[in-house]
């Protein structure tokens, strides 16, 4: 039998082939098959990464009950364990918090974001891109709770955290769109119009200037398209969706 790290890498590598084609149904079947094996063998170190991937997949698919079930299972395997304060555990806390936020439970997400933040900030280098993801997702939850000052601080921290990583333009574009949504939530569309427009235009420049048009670029375009459409930039939203479609079809 393969050692667990190799088994995990194999599962995640095969998962990437489905995600690069936007084939969520096959990705789900693949992960559930791997989880079934891990549970039967009582291999917790394999169950946790699979559950983390399932959380994200179900969130993208809008499968609330499945996402929450995967979240509870992952937390049960992580909280109070010897590895509960390690970086891997922080990733589980972050993913779990993101699920709670996505399904309208922002208040419940904050303690988990805070646990992840404490571990990441004490364990990761200042320029580690994972910090950007944490700050962005935590800020989104804070906006939902009307804690705008804290959210703004985290968005600026996110931009700083990703400025030197290869995908910095994409991560930054997402952050600027999040900042546009935060401005609307705090100020409204009318009073926040100038800031919203500035954030949208900055994100557009970053997306258009990025040259590595791979599966991740397609994912980001797809994610950003609906935001531009929401703010009335219909043609650009359609253009981003079309970019994503062509990349997925060519994968």
Image (cartoon, rainbow, N blue to C red):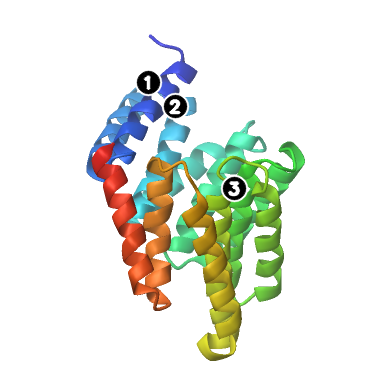
Spatial separation of the CA atoms under disc 2 and disc 3: 30 Å
Q: Position of residue 39 (x, y in %)?
A: 36, 28
Residue at which label 3 appears: 168
Dot 2 and dot 1 residues touching (CB under 8 Å): yes
In the rendered view, does 204 fall on the left or right side of 11? right
Given residues 98 and 223, the one toward you in this image is: 223
Spatial separation of the CA atoms under disc 3 and disc 1: 40 Å
Residue at which label 2 appears: 46
Q: Position of residue 104 (x, y in %)?
A: 45, 68
Q: Earlier in the sequence, mark 3 or mark 1?
A: 1
Dot 3 and dot 1 residues touching (CB under 8 Å): no
Residue occupying the point 61% across, 42% down: 90
Q: Secondary structure at mark 3?
A: helix
- Can the viewer see residue 215 in this picture? yes
Q: Position of residue 240 (x, y in %)?
A: 36, 59
Q: Secondary structure at mark 1?
A: loop
């Amino acid at each position: 039998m393969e050692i667990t790290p190799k088994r995990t890498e194999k599962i995640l590598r095969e998962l990437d082939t489905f995600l690069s084609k936007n084939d969520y149904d096959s990705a789900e079947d693949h992960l559930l098959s791997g989880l079934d094996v891990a549970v039967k063998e009582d291999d917790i170190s394999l169950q946790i990464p699979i559950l983390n991937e399932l959380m994200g997949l179900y969130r993208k698919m809008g499968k609330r009950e499945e996402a929450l079930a995967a979240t509870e299972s992952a937390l049960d395997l992580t909280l109070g364990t010897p590895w509960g304060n390690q970086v891997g555990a922080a990733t589980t806390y972050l993913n779990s918090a993101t699920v709670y936020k996505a399904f309208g439970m922002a208040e419940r997400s904050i303690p988990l974001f805070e646990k992840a933040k404490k571990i990441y900030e004490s364990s990761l280098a200042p320029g580690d891109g994972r910090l950007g993801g944490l700050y962005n997702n935590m800020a989104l939850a804070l906006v939902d709770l009307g804690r705008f000052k804290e959210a703004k601080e985290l968005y600026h921290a996110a931009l700083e955290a990703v400025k030197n990583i290869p995908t910095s333009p994409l991560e930054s574009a997402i952050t600027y769109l999040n900042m546009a949504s935060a401005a609307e939530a705090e100020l409204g569309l009318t009073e926040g119009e100038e800031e919203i427009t500035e954030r949208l235009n900055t994100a557009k420049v970053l997306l258009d200037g990025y040259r590595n048009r791979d599966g991740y670029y397609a994912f980001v375009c797809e994610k950003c398209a609906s935001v531009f459409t929401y703010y009335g930039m219909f043609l650009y939203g359609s253009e981003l969706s079309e970019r994503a479609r062509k990349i997925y079809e060519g994968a």
